[in-house]
Image (cartoon, rainbow, N blue to C red):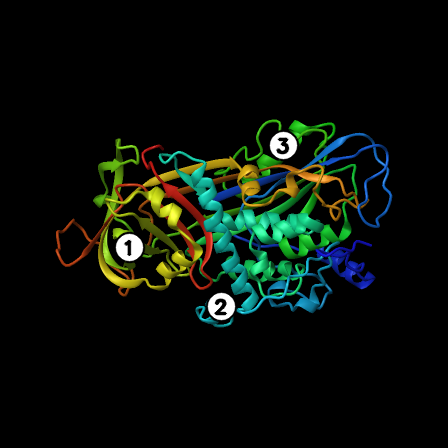
Amino acid sequence: MYSSALGRRAPAPSSHFHSWFQMCRKQKTTGMSGGHHDSFSLSFTYQSIGTTGLCQHTCFPVTFSKKKVSLLSVLLIGLWGSVACQGNPVEDICVAKPRDIPVNPMCIYRFPEKKATEDEASEKKIPEATNRRVWELSKANSRFATTFYQHLADSKNDNDNIFLSPLSISTAFAMTKLGACNDTLKQLMEVFKFDTISEKTSDQIHFFFAKLNCRLYRKANKSSKLVSANRLFGDKSLTFNETYQDISEVVYGAKLQPLDFKENAELSRKTINKWVANKTEGRITDVIPNGAIDEFTILVLVNTIYFKGLWKSRFSPENTREELFYKANGETCSASMMYQEGKFQYRRVAEGTQVLELPFKGDDITMVLILPGPEKSLAKVERDLTPEVLQEWLDDLAEAMLVVHMPRFRVEDGFSLKERLQDMGLVDLFDPEKSKLPGIVAEGRDDLYVSDAFHKAFLEVNEEGSEAAASTGIVIAGRSLNPNRVTFKANRPFLVLIREVALNTIIFMGRVANPCAN
């Protein structure tokens, strides 16, 4: 039994629990295919010394050879909608209670007692019909999003575009957390801000992820498409921990598909990349780079999401014209600048920075643009951006008449997450000597580690959309010079967010530094 200040080995699930999950293996998930994509991948590696597995506490002696095995986990953004288990009283995870879905990971991290802060006491009212923990999980994701973005921006040139899905990354590592123990589990809780949720133990996070997924991806609105798919690709020669498989499938919708990594590593890589391309309408290809999978790989986790939204107030193509875009290095390029006038949520903040919200049809998902003033660099806005500042800006948006100039653009980005996450404190997971991931493989191995993590994302913005509703805005046939209207002209680098409004969940985040690149 594992026992430490950070976690303990949870009791084995009951036979009823396992039989319920076996029924759930026959589940069918539903979703739509639709434009934005993002991907992320991890690599876990195990390393043994001698012939017996190393055990820090009390654990099973495991015999294995002097090898190094990597477990690659690729997670593209995405979540799922529903689970239907035939013959089971819980037919829909979206209406299930915590007691209906026993989550029993190998180790559990207990949160230290926390006193309510003044900020928590004055926080914005939780949206109606929203579970408090789901609301807190969404806020945790926003905290992680801004922190990770700053680390990423610091590592890139000011003239580089950036695009990612913090929700995808967070979801992927939550799935990894299912098999983690000790300091590895503690660091996962801290870096992804899961420890800010008012819950006593870490195992409850998975249930609230399921609820958050339901809020985000099960939408009656058919004007926008926000769908996803998860999958576990495991080496066919191994037996994976049953609880890990069960929770991954039922909570995250990730079924296990066997592949032959040992004999056909390259074919396996191509198979996974093909699956990803199919789930993202061909927008994300080659998310797993050459050499990332080899004969030591034992598991690849994949999470995908696809989003395509129609503007509530469309930009008329007749109004689009070529104009100069001023890049951070002082150079200019020719961009296709879209144009419209109408009522939008807007705010001008310190030093002339403008914040504009453009709704997609359905109003539940919006795009937020953050444009620095002419005398302020985007780099400074990025450095000063905190979760609290961002939340304040969004809370104080108010309707205003605007003249909007916005470039048509296409942004693709792909990068390794390892170094950025290490800088944020996720150290042990990537260290073969310190990583503790005993809850993934059935033998209870305590020698797995993440060798790398990859993320890839795509965003395209153009004029497409539906006619504006009367209360939101109208399409203007020509360009006017109305002095009473505020001008928002994104002809210099700006930040872009795509969020779910009710929960303020940041789904995508990025920087448009050069819309002329594609």
Query: How far separated are the C-alphas under marks 3 and 1?
Result: 48 Å
Determine the residue positioned at 33% across, 48% down. 464
* Residue under label 2: 120
Can residue 379 be seen in this snapshot? yes
Report the mark closest to the observer, 2 or 3: 2
Q: Crowding at label 1, few (<14), some or many (≥20) Cα neighbours within 10 Å? A: few
Q: Nearer the viewer, residue 165 or 339?
A: 165
The quadrant in which the N terminus is found is: bottom right
Quarter of the rendering occupied by the C terminus: top left
Position in image of residue 244 (x %, y %): 72, 51
Q: Which residue is mark 1?
A: 350
Q: Secondary structure at mark 1?
A: helix
Query: Does any portion of residue 33 appear in the rendered image?
Result: no
Q: Which residue is mark 3?
A: 269
Amino acid tagged 1: Ala
Reading the chain from its start, which is encountered first: label 3 or label 1? 3
